[in-house]
């Protein structure tokens, strides 16, 4: 069984896979080994096999038992993943259809498995945010679903920023650098934005069922602008309720993030997580950033905000 050592969301990943799954491994992790991350070692096994189930598509955002069971099953169409929390072990079984669909193996199985491990860990937490680096300054951006977080982060890459992720950033408490880690290899974009971006012509893209979004894999021409690790100096909370830039107090910013950060955590883990979040956000410039419909104007205002 082939084996590769990769990094995903800051975790070091020991990935073993059936040869028919090699394309999935290369598309999700990239080709060749990557340096180890600060997080715990995660074992990932991927096989391609006959169909095993016919669960609804899409599956529930959080599968049954996600916040309590030591073994969590994510099932979608003809494929499934079993996440063993204590062992930090993910077993992925792809049916013939699932192996061809990045929404199945990417969004629902592999991305979700790392998110579940993060939510259940006492030593890691996730923020529902994207991240990028503009003019040498790293920025976290968060927003309610539908506001435009993915578009905002992707547009930064189009304008020359380095892109770290568009939906989830993971913090490892045992990493002294204060970094957050994302998944930069794919982005979720509207068909309109994809169609108006010449560099993305021909990029691998699969529609997300039930949403006006596609999971787009960055083509090789844009991969030099991808980075998984950032040390943010600014955090922006995107809104469409106004078009101003308004400062936020650290305590208010922490409270806005806390529901997502604390999800799935045992009570004993919360003090350390809260202390780290307080420290990280206490060192950042924090603002509520009102979006207009002009993507270039939004980016220009961001550049002025972060300076550099």
Image: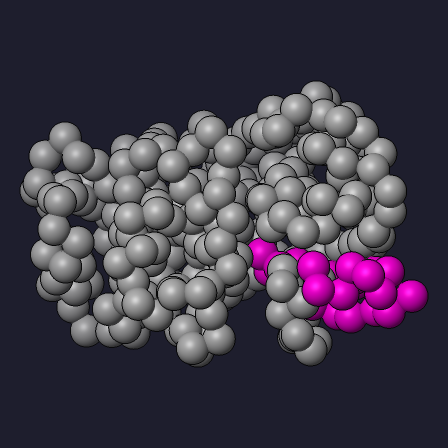
- Give the vertical position of 247 relative to 58 (above or below): below
Picture quadrant of residue 211: top left
Left or right of 94, for residue 235: left
Picture quadrant of residue 252: top left
Q: Is residue 16 magenta?
A: yes
Please name the residue shown 34% across and 45% down the image: 190
Left or right of 258, for residue 73: right
Residue 298 in picture, x, y percent from top left = 14, 54
* Magenta stretch bounds: 1-24
Camera-side residue of 215 and 260: 215
Q: Does the magenta stretch include residue 277?
A: no
Residue 27 in picture, x, y percent from top left = 62, 63
Q: Is residue 47 visible?
A: yes
Picture quadrant of residue 85: top right
Residue 126 in picture, x, y percent from top left = 52, 43
Please name the residue shown 8% across and 42% down the image: 244
- Give the vertical position of 120 relative to 3 (above or below): above
Left or right of 236, for residue 58: right
Q: Is residue 7 visible?
A: no
The quadrant in which the C terminus is found is: bottom left
Please name the residue shown 46% across and 63% down the image: 203
Camera-side residue of 177 and 238: 238
Structure colour scheme: one colour
Camera-side residue of 262 and 227: 227
Please name the residue shown 76% across and 27% down the image: 54
Residue 164 in picture, x, y percent from top left = 44, 61
The quadrant in which the N terminus is found is: bottom right
């Amino acid at each position: 069984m082939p084996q590769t050592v990769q990094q995903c969301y800051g975790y070091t990943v020991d990935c073993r896979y059936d040869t028919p799954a090699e394309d999935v491994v290369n598309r999700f992790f990239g080709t060749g080994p990557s340096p180890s991350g600060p997080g715990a070692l995660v074992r990932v096994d991927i096989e391609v096999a006959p169909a095993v189930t016919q669960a609804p598509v899409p599956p529930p955002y959080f599968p049954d038992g996600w916040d309590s069971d030591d073994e969590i099953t994510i099932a979608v169409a003809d494929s499934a993943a079993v996440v063993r929390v204590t062992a930090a072990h993910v077993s992925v079984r792809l049916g013939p259809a699932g192996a061809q669909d990045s929404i199945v193996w990417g969004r629902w199985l592999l991305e979700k498995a790392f998110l579940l491990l993060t939510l259940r860990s006492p030593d890691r937490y996730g923020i529902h945010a994207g991240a990028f680096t503009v003019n040498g300054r790293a920025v976290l951006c968060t927003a309610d679903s539908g506001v435009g977080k993915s578009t905002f982060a992707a547009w930064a890459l189009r304008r020359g920023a380095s892109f770290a992720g568009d939906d989830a950033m993971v913090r490892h408490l045992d990493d002294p650098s204060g970094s957050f880690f994302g998944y930069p290899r794919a982005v979720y974009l509207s068909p309109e934005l994809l169609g108006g971006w010449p560099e993305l012509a021909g990029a691998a893209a699969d529609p997300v069922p039930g949403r006006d979004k596609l999971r787009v894999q960055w083509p090789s021409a844009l991969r030099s602008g991808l980075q998984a690790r950032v040390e943010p100096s600014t955090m922006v909370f995107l809104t469409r309720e106004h078009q101003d830039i308004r400062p936020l107090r650290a305590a208010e910013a922490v409270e806005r993030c806390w529901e997502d950060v604390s999800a799935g955590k045992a009570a004993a883990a919360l003090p350390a997580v809260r202390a780290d979040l307080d420290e990280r956000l206490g060192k950042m410039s924090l603002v509520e950033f009102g979006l207009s419909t002009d993507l270039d104007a939004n980016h220009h205002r961001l550049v002025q905000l972060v300076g550099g």
